[in-house]
Image (spheres, rainbow, N blue to C red):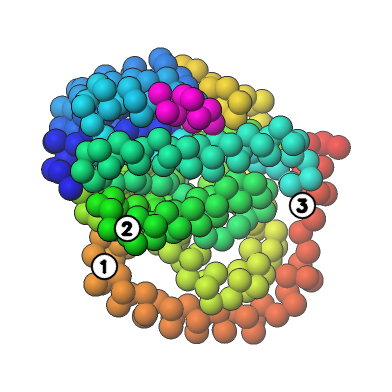
Amino acid sequence: MRPLNEQSVVITGASSGIGRRTAIEFGRRGAMLTLAARNEEALNETAEEVRAAGGRAHVVVTDVAEWDQVERLAQQAAEHWERIDTWVNNAGVTVYSLFETLSVAEIDRVIRVNLLGQIYGAKAALPHLRHAGGGTLINVSSEVGVRGVPLQSVYCAAKHGIKGFTEALRMELEHEGANIQVTLIVPSGINTPFFEHARSKMGVKPKPPGAVYEPEVVADAIVFAAENPRREIFVGAPAKSYDLLQRVSPRLVDRMMLAGGHAFEDQMTDSPDSGFDNVFETQGGKGSSRGVFPGRASSWYTRTFEHHPALKAVAAGVAAGSVAALALGLGSRLGGKADRRRFDPRGSLRRTLGR
Ligand code: NDP
């Protein structure tokens, strides 16, 4: 892997949130960036922020759901910087809704952007990574890519799909002995404009459930992966906890989430939905890295364990034992409670919507 100040890095979803912050962090290390998304004004703002941080930036307006545009992005990045060393598949959108109230067009779009967008990104990037003599493909998934949650069924499907795709591709490349690393990034809730960009059919604006981290924490993990080969990096302890609990007892996780309706209510604010989203078209404007749910500026868990494979293996063993013990204890305490304290999402959403 080349040092970051010699790397040409493509980032999709670079006009906002994690992608934008990641671009700036690469810029601080002197990388050559190709910034992709649909909002040209916000991409140009990001490019200015990258240059101010010490990096170099080139903008290519791209809709990742369109193969021709993704292929053109790769070609333009390779032409502009003479090669591609790292490709970050990060663009994403979501619709907060019960599955049955999603339209077919919304279902298609969420899959096209989140899943096909990353598959197209890999397809377009790989020939250029090979041509450069090797490189890194980084796919941004989510904690809901290791464990599904209600109100985001199709987004969860796309994020689980990214995990399966990443595992299969990694093995093909490893089997061949290709000098290409494939890293899966698994963020917990992050304070980005994602929640203002999301389409909401809940009547209220969505919010991240549980602990939230600032976008720098994910950016830090992505930049780290571009220099240090890693299979996957969980960003924030909550994402790893989901992963471990899910392995121990998926049914217990169902019960924990359903008890009192937390899995629904924790994703809903009290503020009425704005009616604006970026699912089919960009929202426009200058954009921002940060959202309106301030979070933690660092993750001790990620820096300590996810960056160090040996410590991670030890931690996984200890954590699996603790989680199993917790699961057994909780399981016996929760038994049947979820059914008694029944949360009716349809009723609740109807009340929220005033119907
Ligand atoms: P933002 O909404 O802030 O950023 C999403 C980015 O994707 C924007 O730059 C948007 O720009 C771009 N985008 C959306 N649709 C397309 C498209 N069709 N083609 C090209 N670009 C597109 O959200 P985040 O920064 O939070 O999200 C980044 C990634 O992190 C996503 O994959 C998301 O799923 C994931 N993630 C986020 C979490 C969170 O809590 N925020 C938690 C876990 C994972 P534009 O409108 O200009 O196209």
Q: Quadrant of the C terminus?
A: top right
Query: Start and end of the magenta stretch?
Result: 64-72
- Label 3 sits on residue: 345
Magenta run includes residue 353: no
Earlier residue among tags 3 and 2:
2
Amino acid under label 1? Pro
Residue under the image location 60 percent in, 46 percent down:
155
Instruction: Confirm whether residue 167 shows in the render.
Output: yes
Secondary structure type for disc 1: helix
Mark 3 or mark 1, which is nearer the start of the sequence? 1
Q: Which badge, 1 or 2, comes first in the chain's sequence?
A: 2
Magenta part mainly helix, strand or loop? helix
Image check: 286 left or right of 159?
left
Q: Foreground mark, 1 or 3?
A: 1
Q: Residue 164: where, in percent of width, then height?
A: 51, 57
Q: Position of residue 266 (x, y in %)?
A: 61, 52
Give residue 56's quadrant in the image: top left
Seen in the picture, residue 266 relative to 67 is either above or below; the reply is below
Image check: 124 left or right of 81?
A: right
Instruction: Using the numbered discs, state the Cα–Cα distance from disc 1 to disc 2 in whole angstroms.
Output: 23 Å
Q: Residue at x 43, y 83 (%)?
A: 321
* Whole-percent x, y for residue 260 in the image: 70, 62
The residue that label 1 is drawn on is: 309
Residue 210 against residue 44 in the figure, above or below: below
Mark 2 residue type = Glu
Secondary structure at numbered mark 2: helix
Dot 2: within a 10 Å radius of its alpha carbon, few (fewer than 14), some, or many (20 or more) residues? Answer: few
Residue at x 70% of width, y 59% of height = 261
